[in-house]
Amino acid sequence: MTALVWADSENPDSPAVQSPATPRPGRAQRRRPPVGRALLLLVFAAYFFIPLYAAVDFTLGGSRRNMGHTLSVWTGLVHQEGFTTNLMTSLKIAGGTVLLLLVLMVPTMAWLHLRLPHLRRVVEGVCLLPMAIPAVVIANGIIGAFKSWPQAITGSSWILILEYVILALPFTYRSLDAGLSAIPLTTMVEAARSLGASWPVTLWRVVVPNIRTAIASAGILGAALALGEFTIANLLLLNTFPVWTDQAGQQDGEVATTASMLILFLSWLLLMLVSHLGRGRTAKKSLKLRRSK
């Protein structure tokens, strides 16, 4: 233990006074577990999981007394009229959204980091606008802006793909910005260009492999948004899986709840995939560092 010893400066003959030693934190002085935080987490978990449990129990026939739980609603969901068609439509829209989103944003974000870093805040503010504008306002704006466009675009899933690209900009910007900020982008690009690589080759063979986790995160978040969006598709009178779920709920509540749970679990699966990819890449980097040492 360390103690401080000092004497009275006015009276040098006075005995030295020893300050109480500062004890090191031991077992008896360890901080108590944060009970308030644990209770708060418990309340949030109950708020989230109790309705989820009730919804799953409802889809398994828990509302029908003395009949037990059964998977009949889940197994019969595929045979519902319009289920497969609308689900495939939503999957195609999600795939088109992810493809167009990444083709537009990956080169743009790389160029922004390389040549225009002072405009990152401005671009970030623009990309965050879809989170501040209500979906109803966006849908009405789309109807007014594209009313003179061909029916092949305004009356098909293309209009939703273009709109979902805009809605996914906040998530895409955050993911790609974090991925590009974590690598020495300028050094890698200059090295590739000095070896004679063109910009497309540099982007495809140098930049993309180093931010593949960020690209996967942006793509999966965009796909989850496209699979679950309802308001704009309903206002534009286009049949997607969420719209079909709402229409099915007017006739059979169990079918609609089961379809909603299916989309929810699919979104969770995609997010878990993002988390697994991120942990896998971190583990590989740690293993390489250990081997290099």
Image: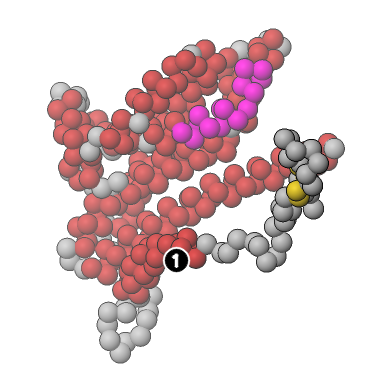
Q: Quadrant of residue 184?
A: top right
Q: Magenta: predominant secondary structure element? A: helix
Give left or right: position of 45 versus 63.
right
At mark 1, the secondary structure is helix
The location of residue 24, given as percent across then percent down, is 72, 55
Image coloring type? secondary structure
Determine the image quadrant of residue 245: bottom left
Q: Nearer the viewer, residue 185 or 164?
A: 185
Which span of residues is magenta-colored?
174-188
Question: Residue 36, position in %: x, y?
Answer: 46, 63
Task: Count neighbours of disc 1 (C-alpha within 10 A) and say few if under 14, some if 14 to 19, many if 20 or more.
Answer: few
- Tell whether 175 sits left or right of 286: left
The answer to whether residue 288 is visible is no
Image quadrant holding the C terminus, namely top right
Q: Which residue is mark 1?
A: 39
Is residue 108 positioned above or below 159 on the image? above
The reply to whether the magenta stretch includes residue 257 is no
Q: Amino acid at mark 1?
A: Leu
Residue at 58% x, 21% y is 203
- Name the spot of residue 239 as percent of width and height, x first: 23, 47
Question: Is residue 290 toward the left or the right of residue 93 in the image?
Answer: right
| Residue drawn at (38%, 42%) of the image | 94
Can residue 128 be seen in the rendering of this structure?
Answer: yes
Q: Residue at x 71, y 61 (%)?
A: 26
